[in-house]
Amino acid sequence: MSTKTNPKLVPVASQQRGLYNLTQDLLHTFLPNAEYNKVFFVNDISEQLKLGTDQQMVASVLAGMLSAVIRDANDSFIRVSAKVYGNVVLVHVKKTGQLNISAIEQEVNKMQPMVEKMLGSVSVTSEQINLTTVTFGFPNLPLLD
């Protein structure tokens, strides 16, 4: 006689995924292009940073940011980091080397409606000639319908 066990229902709070792991998974999807173009990644996000908001929306925005930065990157270094200010998370994707800023801004503008649904913001800055930063800020709280 076989017995079937019912899967345990896990509370949503314990299903929270870390931003570090989410970012690692996304970076892994870009590895073939990155290796071909000699692009190197560093994920400096704390493994303790849990997401309290919609993980799929965060993943979509991060994927768009990474795609925009990686698209024309060659022989460069990309660092992803995050800072927490209260309930707000700021994710920075910094790339060294030359980059087409207007192309990145166009991609970032396409993400704006989704970012606004999260009550967040996304922007591109070129702090120095060879350093570009794409910043994504969002409240790390559950989204209200």
Image: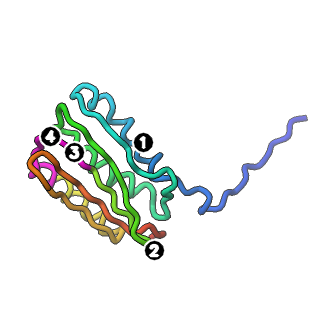
Residue 140: x percent and y percent? 44, 67
Report the amino acid beneath label 2.
Answer: Leu
**Which label is found at residue 24?**
1
Element at label 3: strand
Mark 2 and mark 3: Cα distance apart in space: 34 Å
Element at label 2: loop
Residue 42: x percent and y percent? 34, 41
On the image, numbered disc 3 is attached to which residue? 95
Which of the two discs, 1 and 3, labels the residue nearer the N terminus?
Answer: 1
User: Quadrant of the image for the C terminus?
Assistant: bottom left
Q: Disc 2 vs disc 3: which is toward the camera?
A: 3
- Where residue 27 sits, quadrant-wise, is top left
Element at label 4: loop
Q: Residue at x 50, y 52 (%)?
A: 18
Above or below, 24 relative to 85: above
On the image, numbered disc 2 is attached to which residue? 144
Mark 2 and mark 1: Cα distance apart in space: 27 Å
| Label 2 Cα crowd, 10 Å radius (few <14 / some 14-19 / many 20+) | few
